[in-house]
């Protein structure tokens, strides 16, 4: 006779802990979500402060407008982020995962919603194991509906970084949201609800690559959540007379019950540990009740736990110095580039459809397509000049006025004296100057063809 298969739910029901690490986690959840949810609503000089406009390919960042030609700054930001991840992980382990990672933040919010509608862990566990009834249906329905509403608002907020947020929300009642805006908002909302509302710690254990390669960035002086085995073992309950024949750990299991990843920190360093520190809060609370010193579980390093040695200073760790130096250098270079960056750009492309031709005066004329990008909010007027060996003149539109936050494309003709320039290709420079602020000037190089 075949043995029946029993499916056991792997869902975790972490207890709510109290303490400094739990308070820090709550604070980070609130701060990160306020920044994420409110930033698209902030206006700066009459327009949304932070927005990436796909139509015009412009990034608006608190008055700074970046064009596709400014991709170098995005590359610099990615380099800084990567080096910062390496540096932070080497120094502080996975504190990013435990306090600021979006998966952690959204999972914590979903747990708050569950506790609000379904009660504490024991009540949720019993209700999930019980058959469906009116109470279970009502509580589960309210919990999932609230999670979905939060996920939808999160998805809408994300789209608000790419489409004007105020217009997006104003168009919702009338169904005027575009197809792609609705698609990405619903997609992000669905992933938020699925990953944070249901998969939760499974994402950190099996889907996140950071958990897998973090060990490469650790060393024996990296800060980790650690259990003091020498003090805690052998673990066991205290005697009724108050004496203690065993280690400090009373084997209460609270460190496991509060862990959002469902691990036992007493088994040593594990890749599933996200460094949130809630097990420290739970253990410290037990130690306080037993009138024992705190720190049975604490933030420490492997060398400090095994040898009792104080961790080396920042400057005594070569990798940390190298990472910090590279980050500082990249930041300084990016800041210098932004400081010297002009608020307009010019692109010059020689017209390949029209070859060089001879004018009535005997000069050789080349045609160029010029595009001016104005990133200022107001319209600007520019002057354009071409210079180079043998260049004798140019023909271009009389008025080079570019609208605010816009661009202008036109054709110019540059003439050169064949008596000065030999056959072949020769360099010329085309300078663009703002008439309102003459000190703002950019120069592009091109080639003039002499047949």
Image (cartoon, rainbow, N blue to C red):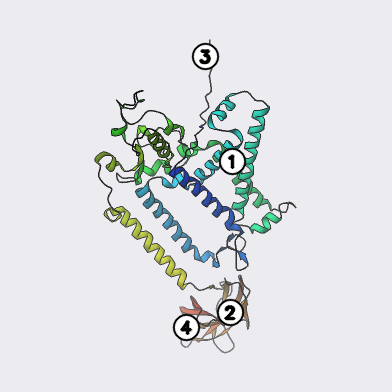
Q: Is residue 81 left or right of residue 221?
A: right
In front: mark 3 or mark 4? 3
Distance between the Cα atoms at labels 3 and 4?
90 Å
In front: mark 2 or mark 3? 3
Q: Secondary structure at mark 2?
A: strand
Q: Secondary structure at mark 1?
A: helix
Query: Is there CB contact under 8 Å for labels 4 and 2?
Result: no
Q: Secondary structure at mark 3?
A: loop
Q: In which quarter of the view is residue 136 placed? A: top right
Q: Residues within 10 Å of mark 2 (few under 14, many from 20)?
A: some
Distance between the Cα atoms at labels 2 and 1?
56 Å
In front: mark 1 or mark 3? 1
Q: Secondary structure at mark 4?
A: loop
Residue 388 numbered mark, or none: 4
Using the image as rendered, state which of residue 173 and residue 98 is in the foreground.
Answer: 98
According to the picture, the residue beneath numbered tag 1 turns out to be 193
Residue located 51% across and 45% down the image: 105
Q: Is residue 327 left or right of residue 18?
A: left
Residue 412 numbered mark, or none: 2
Q: Earlier in the sequence, mark 1 or mark 3?
A: 3
Q: Does residue 184 appear in the picture of this structure? A: no
Q: In which quarter of the view is residue 359 placed? A: bottom right
Q: Does residue 247 appear in the picture of this structure? A: yes
**Residue 302: x percent and y percent?**
30, 41
According to the picture, the residue beneath numbered tag 3 turns out to be 3
**Residue 16: x percent and y percent?**
50, 37
Q: Earlier in the sequence, mark 2 or mark 1?
A: 1
Q: Earlier in the sequence, mark 1 or mark 4?
A: 1
Q: Is residue 343 left or right of residue 76?
A: right
């Amino acid at each position: 006779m075949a043995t029946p298969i029993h499916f056991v739910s792997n869902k975790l029901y972490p207890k709510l802990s109290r303490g400094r690490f739990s308070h820090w986690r709550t604070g980070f959840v609130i701060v990160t979500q306020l920044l994420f949810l409110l930033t698209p609503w902030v206006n700066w000089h009459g327009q949304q402060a932070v927005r990436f406009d796909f139509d015009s390919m412009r990034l608006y960042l608190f008055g700074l407008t970046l064009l596709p030609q400014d991709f170098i700054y995005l590359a610099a930001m990615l380099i800084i982020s990567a080096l910062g991840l390496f540096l932070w992980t080497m120094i502080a382990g996975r504190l990013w995962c435990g306090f600021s990672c979006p998966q952690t933040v959204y999972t914590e919010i979903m747990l708050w919603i569950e506790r609000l509608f379904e009660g504490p862990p024991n009540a949720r566990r019993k209700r999930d194991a019980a058959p469906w009834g009116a109470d279970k249906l009502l509580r589960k329905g309210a919990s999932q509906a609230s999670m979905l509403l939060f996920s939808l608002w999160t998805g809408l907020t994300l789209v608000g970084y790419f489409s004007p947020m105020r217009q997006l929300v104003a168009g919702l009642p009338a169904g005027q949201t575009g197809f792609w805006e609705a698609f990405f908002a619903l997609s992000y909302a669905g992933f938020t609800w699925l990953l944070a509302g249901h998969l939760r710690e499974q994402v950190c254990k099996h889907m996140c690559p950071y958990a897998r390669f973090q060990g490469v960035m650790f060393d024996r002086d990296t800060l980790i959540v650690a259990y003091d085995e020498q003090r805690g073992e052998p673990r066991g309950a205290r005697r009724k007379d108050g004496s203690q024949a065993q280690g400090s750990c009373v084997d209460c299991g609270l460190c496991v019950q509060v862990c959002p990843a469902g691990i036992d920190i007493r088994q040593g360093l594990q890749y599933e540990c996200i460094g949130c520190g809630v097990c420290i809060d739970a253990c410290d609370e037990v130690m306080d009740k037993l009138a024992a010193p705190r720190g049975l579980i604490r933030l420490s390093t492997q060398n400090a736990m095994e040898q009792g040695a104080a961790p080396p200073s920042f400057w005594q760790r070569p990798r940390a110095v190298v990472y910090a130096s590279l980050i500082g250098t990249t930041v300084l270079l990016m800041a210098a580039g932004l400081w010297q960056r002009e608020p307009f750009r010019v692109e010059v492309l020689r017209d390949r459809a029209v070859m060089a031709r001879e004018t009535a005066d005997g000069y050789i004329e080349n045609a160029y397509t010029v595009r001016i990008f104005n990133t200022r909010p107001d319209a600007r007027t520019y002057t354009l000049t071409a210079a180079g060996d043998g260049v004798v003149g140019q023909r271009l539109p009389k008025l080079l006025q570019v609208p605010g936050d816009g661009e202008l494309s036109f054709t110019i003709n540059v003439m050169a004296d064949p008596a000065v320039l030999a056959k072949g290709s020769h360099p010329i420079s085309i300078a663009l100057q703002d008439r309102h602020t003459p000190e703002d000037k950019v120069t592009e190089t091109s080639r003039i063809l002499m047949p």
